[in-house]
Each structure stands twice: as C-alpha cells, then as structure tokens.
Image (spheres, rainbow, N blue to C red):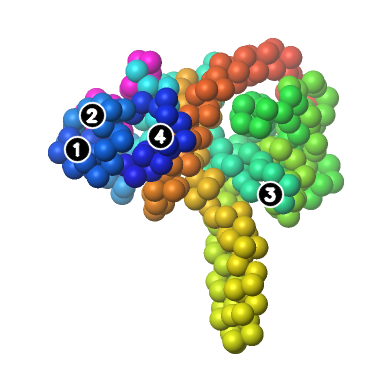
Amino acid sequence: MAGAGLSLVRHPDIRYLFFGEEPAIEEQIARHPRLSEKCEIVHTDVAVAMDQRPSQALRKGRWKSSMWLAIEAVKEGRADAVVSAGNTGALMAMSKFCLKTLPEIERPAIAAIWPTVSAECVVLDVGANVGADAGQLIDFAVMGAAMSRALCELERPSVGLLNIGVEEVKGLEEIRKAGAALRTCDPPFRYHGFVEGDDVGQGLVDVVVTEGFTGNIALKTAEGTAKQIGAYLRAAMNRSMFARIGAFLAQGAFRALKDKMDPRQLNGGVFLGLNGIVIKSHGGTDATGFASAVDLGYDMARSGLVARMSDDVARFHDALDLDSVA
C-alpha cells in the first residue's frame, strides 16, 4: 500500500482496485490517506498461499481468490494492468488460463529490466519456461523488442540470443536454429547475433533472449553479485579512519552507485505474450520496489504494449519459415 502511494505521487491519474480482506486494506489506507480517493476495494478472504502449487492454486483459487479477481479485472477491462507480489507460478498459471495467450504465442515469458553501463536492456525469459525451442526463442525476441520499443522508444531495438559463445557453430541446436532463422528473415528489430553472459551488463544489445532456466539463474546471479559488491564496499569503507574519511568525501558518488545497483529501482517482471498486462513484483521488496512495479505496469498500459506486440507477432509469423532453416 505504501508503494501504491509512492506511485500515485508520480502518476496522479492512477486509479487502484485493491483485492483482498477489506478491513486489512482499510487499515492500511488510513495510514496513506492520499489513496482513499483513488481506490476501490473488492473484498475477498481467499488468498493463494506462497507455497501452493500452480495447479492447486488454479483449482482452489479460481473465481474467489484475490489473485484471480485481480487478473479477471484486466480481462473485463476494469483494469489496465495487474501487479502482484504473490506466488509466481500461480500468477502465471491463472494469468494464462484467464487472459489466454496472444494468437501464435505458445508460451508466455517473463521479461525483466536489466541495468547496464549505458542504459537498461530487456532480458527474457527469466523464469516462466524451462527450455525453449527455436520458434519460442524467436517469439521471445519479437515480444522483447516490442517491450523495448514501448519503454525506451527505440524504433528498431537490437536483439541478441544468449549463448556460450558468439561463433555460429556454438551452443544448443535450438539456439543455433533460431539464430539462423533470424539472420535469413526480416524481423521487426535489428538482430545482433549471439551474445555471451558478460555482454549483458555492457549494454551490447537492447534485448537479450534466452530460456527461463538460464535466464533465472543469470538474474539471481546478477542480484547476488550486486549485494556482494555492496558488502565489499561497506567493509572497505570502514576498514580504517582514513577509509572512513575518504568514504565521507565520496559519499555523493557512492549514493549514485547505490542507486544504480539498487534492484528495487527496476523491480517487476512483465508476463509477455498474454492478452493483458501482468506484472510480478518481488515478494520481498519494500515500498520503493513495489512502486517501481506499479510504475512499470502504468508505462506498459500507456504505451499500448499488448496491441503493438500482437501486431508484430502476427506480421512476423506470416513471413517466418522455420522449416526452411537447416
């Protein structure tokens, strides 16, 4: 609720639908009175537990749970986006069941905003799918490029396939097949080729495409590395009196570095490929992080992401012939 309040300051035209236990929500609104004129509460006492399997959540939580009702509001046009910090698997299962996927899209993907030395890039999939064939990787590329255009206003974003090397002979067969197809057709983006893990943070491309197993490990590794560097810096700055004095004199630079490395500033994974906007917030984030997820949903809705993506996917599928790629 505090995060919703922060996002409302940045976007005064936001209106909220809060789904959950009405007394608990009203208690929070009393602490953030600015929200009272900008929200509607939909009461339900059914919630999806964090440890529930997606199949159980879908079977038991459909129609009545706060998660389902929030997604249904998007389907019915009463909301432009849903933001949840709940069970990721359940959120994906319910979103796919309720909203359905776009035509031609077999599997949705989770896309994350990744900080780089130059700007930010879109990385997908970061956890929705374990494994992906060439066609699905190409779909991810088209969807990621549409998201990059919507967020960064790039006419033709550059897209790279994450691989163990940049040479065309390296990597799994499906990655090489996807790369070959993208080189021989005319995608609605600039296809860069293969990129390696150390290229992501350098901002070599605007969109990095991989499957969910590798993408999730890469994401968690990056988050852990950022925390590790932060711990090293704090230890170094407190090592001696001279170090503390130096840290005091450089506190402006350290604040800028902290902001750049703060995962809360880029919190929120977008479920791409659905007939609606669904944002997954990190479950352990604070108000700042949740506000970032709300901001992301706001930007996606304002940019007309779903319509753009549907257009791109339809036009590209008509021109793509994977069977012709050896």
Name which residue type carries label 2: Ile
Q: Hey, which residue is sitting farthest left in the picture?
A: 23
- The dot on residue 41 is 2
Q: Quadrant of residue 183?
A: top right
Q: Quadrant of residue 179?
A: top right
Q: Is residue 135 visible?
A: no
- Residue indicated by mark 4: 8
Secondary structure type for disc 3 = loop
Q: Is residue 181 above or below residue 87?
A: above
Mark found first going from the N terminus, 4 or 1: 4
Please identify, in this view, whether the residue under mark 4 or under mark 2 is nearer the observer: 4
Q: CA distance from mark 2 to mark 3?
A: 39 Å
Name which residue type carries label 3: Thr
User: Along the line of sight, which residue is nearer the eye, 204 or 12?
Assistant: 12
- The dot on residue 116 is 3
Q: CA distance from mark 1 to mark 3?
A: 40 Å
Marks 2 & 3, CB-CB < 8 Å contact: no
Whole-percent x, y for residue 169 in the image? 83, 44
- Specify whether residue 55 is painted magenta: no
The magenta-colored residue range is 62-77
Please identify, in this view, whether the residue under mark 1 or under mark 3 is nearer the observer: 1
Q: CA distance from mark 4 to mark 1?
A: 17 Å
Question: Residue at point 72% right, 51% down?
Answer: 117
Q: CA distance from mark 3 to mark 4?
A: 28 Å
